[in-house]
Amino acid sequence: MSSLADSGAPHFRALLPHPAPDVDLATAYAYPAVLNRPWLRANMIASADGGAWGPSGRSRDLSSAADRTAMGILRGLCDVVLAGAGTARIEGYRPVRPREVWGRLREGRTATPPVAVVTRTLDLNPALLAEAPEDARTIVLTTESAPAARRRAAARSSEVVLAGDDSVRPEKAMAALAERGLFRVLTEGGPHLLAEFTSAGLLDELCLTVSPHLTGPGPSRIVAGNVPSHAQNLELGHLLESESSLFLRYTKRD
Ligand SMILES: NC(=O)c1ccc[n+]([C@@H]2O[C@H](COP(=O)([O-])OP(=O)(O)OC[C@H]3O[C@@H](n4cnc5c(N)ncnc54)[C@H](OP(=O)(O)O)[C@@H]3O)[C@@H](O)[C@H]2O)c1
C-alpha cells in the first residue's frame, strides 16, 4: 500500500488544535466511527477575500496540489459525492477515479464513490453518466417536472431518483442516499446547492480551504441564491496548513 508520505504529495502540518509537523489526512478527516443517520460534509474552497471562484469562473483557479490532495482523501473517505449540476457542468465532472493513496480506505466498499448530481434540466455531461462503473453508477437526483425524455435517456446508464416536484428537496435527496446505504455524504457544492442543504439544516460539517488568492468582488461566496437565512454556529475541529493554503474543519455546534 502506498501512502501520502511516499507519493511525493504535498506536506500538511497541523496548527490547531495541537501543532504537529505531520498530519495523516485520512485520520484527520475521518467520519464519525458510528453513524446511524446520514452525515453531510461539505468541502469548499474560498479565496482569502471570500470568493468561490477565480478569473476563469471555476473554483479550480483557487485550488492547488495541496487542495487536490485533501479533496482526494475526502473523496476516498466518503460513500457518495453530491454535486449541483452547475458545478458538474462548469468543472467538467466525471465519475470519481480510484487513487492509489487511498490504500485500504475503501475496504469493504465500492472501489470509488458514486457521484450524485442534483438537477432540474438533466443537462449533464454524458460521460458523467455513461462512464461510471456498474457498482457506483451516477445517481441523478431530479424532479417530477424534469423533461421526461431526458429522464428516460439518463436512466439507461444511471440511477434516476425523483426527489421533489419542481425542485429537489434536500431532505428527500439525503433520504434517497441513505436508503442506498450511502451515509457518508460529501458535497462539493456549488454555492447554490450548499445554500439549500445548509438552509434545510442538513449540513453537519464544513471542510473549508482558504486559498492564498484575492479574487475581488465579482465571484459569489461559497453559498449563494435566494434561500432562507441559515445562521448557525460552528466549532473548529482542526486547522491545517500546506503550501500557504489553510484547511479548516468545522462541525455544526448545537
Ligand atoms: N468554491 C468552491 O468550493 C466551489 C465549489 C463548487 C463550485 N464552485 C463554483 O461555483 C460555480 C457554480 O455555482 P452554482 O452555485 O451555480 O452551482 P451548483 O449549486 O453546483 O449548481 C446549480 C444547479 O444545480 C441544480 N440544482 C441546485 N439546486 C437544485 C434543486 N433544489 N433542485 C434541482 N436542481 C437543483 C440546478 O441544475 P440544472 O440547471 O441542471 O437544473 C442548478 O442550476 C462555478 O463557478 C464553480 O466553479 C465553487
Image (tube, rainbow, N blue to C red):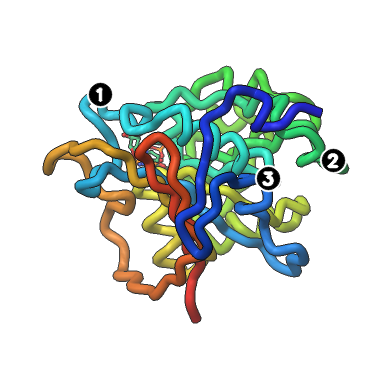
On the question of residue 18 being in view, the answer is yes
Query: Mark 3 vs mark 2: which is more N-terminal?
Result: 3
On the question of residue 166 being in view, the answer is no
Residue highlighted by disc 2: 107
Mark 2 residue type: Glu
- Where on the picture, by quarter, is residue 57? top left
Mark 1 surroundings within 10 Å by alpha-carbon count, few (fewer than 14), some (14 through 19), many (20 or more)? few
Please state which of the two labelled residues, at mark 1 or mark 2, is closer to the viewer: 2
**59 w.r.t. 240: above or below:** above
- List x then y, in percent, for residue 181: 77, 53
Q: Nearer the viewer, residue 17 or 164?
A: 17
- Left or right: 237, with 152 as reference point: left
- Left or right: 203, with 129 as reference point: left
The disc placed on residue 77 is 3
Residue at position x 30%, y 70% in the image: 229
In three-dimensional space, the C-alpha distance between marks 1 and 2, rounded to whole angstroms, equals 38 Å
Classify mark 2: helix, strand or loop.
loop
Mark 2 surroundings within 10 Å by alpha-carbon count, few (fewer than 14), some (14 through 19), many (20 or more)? few
**222 w.r.t. 69: above or below:** below
Classify mark 1: helix, strand or loop.
loop
Residue highlighted by disc 1: 56
- Left or right: 216, with 2 as reference point: left
Classify mark 3: helix, strand or loop.
helix
Query: Mark 1 vs mark 2: which is more N-terminal?
Result: 1
CB atoms at circles 3 and 2 under 8 Å apart? no
